[in-house]
Amino acid sequence: MESNSIDYSGLQVSKQDIICMCPLEGTIDIISKKWALLVIGILGNKGTTRFARIEEDLKGIRPKALTGVLRDLQKTGIIKRKAYPEVPPRVEYSLTKNGYELRKAIIPLLKWAASNSSTRQDVCPILKPKMLTR
């Protein structure tokens, strides 16, 4: 008789809990970039935000790297960019519907990382414990 579970290194996993990982291929390419998840987090937390504010929140990112991440996220439909015809030019970024859905899907991962991490969330400008309760 066939078992309804599979043994993974001593951990019994139900066959019902096994899912196809194929859809992650494109998503992993997007979110595995160094700053992508943090940009998604900032835009999700703050809403529509200008380039300089994102750069300020991501201490240590170079403008060229941030531009690249923003372009990649825009190309994939995670964020939208709105340029205003002003002098000096004003550009704002925000999450799209897909971006909000991705952020919502990432929150359990964030909670897991916070509970299994030795990092100090109380000093992290992005990952504050109060944000994890949303």
Image: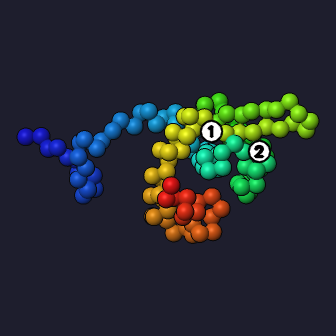
Q: Residues within 10 Å of mark 1 (few under 14, many from 20)?
A: many
Image x and y of residue 50, in percent = 76, 44
The residue labelled by disc 1 is 95
Image x and y of residue 122, in percent = 59, 69
Q: Identify which amino acid the numbered label 1 is placed on.
A: Leu
In the image, 54 versus 13, the foreground residue is 54
Q: Quadrant of residue 3?
A: top left
Q: Secondary structure at mark 1?
A: strand
Dot 2 or dot 1, earlier in sequence: 2
Q: Secondary structure at mark 2?
A: helix
Left or right of residue 126: residue 24 = left
Q: Who's the residue at 49% across and 62% down the image? A: 114
| 70, above or below 7, in the image | above
Image x and y of residue 128, in percent = 58, 63
In the image, 78 versus 20, the foreground residue is 78
Left or right of residue 57: residue 28 = left
In the image, 57 versus 44, the foreground residue is 44
- Per the rendering, the mark at residue 22 is none
The residue labelled by disc 2 is 51
Say which quadrant the N terminus sits in: top left
Q: Who's the residue at 45% across and 52% down the image? A: 108
Q: Who's the residue at 57% across and 66% down the image? A: 121
Q: Residues within 10 Å of mark 2 (few under 14, many from 20)?
A: some
Marks 2 and 1, how far apart in space? 14 Å
**Residue 96 in view (yes/no):** yes
